[in-house]
Image (tube, helix red, strand yellow):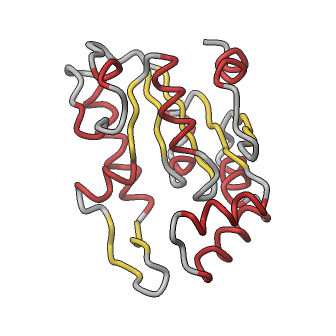
Amino acid sequence: MKAVIISGTPGTGKTTLSKRLALRLNYFYFDVNDFIAKNKLYESYDRKRKTRVVDVANLNKELIKEINTLTKKPINDKYNKKIPIKHKKLKKISGIVIDSHLSHYLPRRYVDLCIITKCGINELNKRLKKKGYGKNKIQENLQAEIFDICLNEAKERKHKIMIIDTTKGFNIDIITRKIGV
C-alpha cells in the first residue's frame, strides 16, 4: 500500500490538497486531527494557544496501528466523512493520504512520499485570520512558515519530499503527474 503524507504549516492548504489527491488517486483520506480527537490522543489542552498538546511518539504508535488495521479489513469511513460519497465506495485500500501538520513525524519506512504545502506569508496571514486564529497563533504559524519548520523536520527524518506552493492554488493534474501514479 502506498502512503502519502501531507504536512505543512496550518493554513497552507494541506486538507484541500489531501482530499483532492485522495480522490484523484482513489486512495483513502485519513484526517489525523479527527483521529486525535476521537481517540483522545492528546495530553492536555493549551488554552492560551487554543490547541491540543499531542505526544508525537504516542500518536505515531497509534497511527501505525490504525494504518495497519485499515489495510487488513474493508474500509471504515469514520475518518473519511468529509469527502465525496463517490470516494467512500472504495472497497479496497490501494493507498492512503494522511493529512496533518504532524504527519511528517511518521517514520520514513511507513511513508512513500511526504508532500509539504507552502504558502506566501501575506496569503497565509489572510487564511489564518479567516479561520479565526488569534493574533499570537497567527504570528506563531507565520514564523513556522518563514522558518520552514515542517519542511526541515521532514528533511531531518529523511523523507522523500515534494514541495507544493498553494499561494495561488494548485493544479492536481500536474501534482499527480509529478508523483508518477
Describe residue 126's horizontal placement relative to residue 71 as left or right: right
Q: Residue at x 54, y 26 (%)?
A: 21
Given residues 40 and 167, the one toward you in this image is 167
Describe residue 162's horizontal placement relative to residue 58 as left or right: right
Q: Residue at x 30, y 16 (%)?
A: 90
State the image quarter where residue 101 is shown: bottom right
Given residues 55 and 33, the one toward you in this image is 33
Given residues 35 and 127, the one toward you in this image is 127
Given residues 156 and 82, the one toward you in this image is 82
Looking at the picture, does residue 121 appear above or below residue 80? below
State the image quarter where residue 145 is shown: bottom right
Q: Position of residue 47 (x, y in %)?
A: 40, 85
Q: Position of residue 153 (x, y in %)?
A: 67, 55
Residue at the outermost bottom position = 48
Describe residue 130's horizontal placement relative to residue 31 as left or right: right
Q: Position of residue 148 (x, y in %)?
A: 75, 58
Q: Position of residue 107 (x, y in %)?
A: 52, 43
Badge count: 0
Q: Residue at x 24, y 21 (%)?
A: 72
Describe residue 146's horizontal placement relative to residue 79 as left or right: right
Which quarter of the figure is the C terminus placed in?
A: top right
Which quarter of the figure is the N terminus placed in?
A: top left
Looking at the picture, does residue 104 appear above or below residue 54? above
Q: Residue at x 48, y 43 (%)?
A: 99
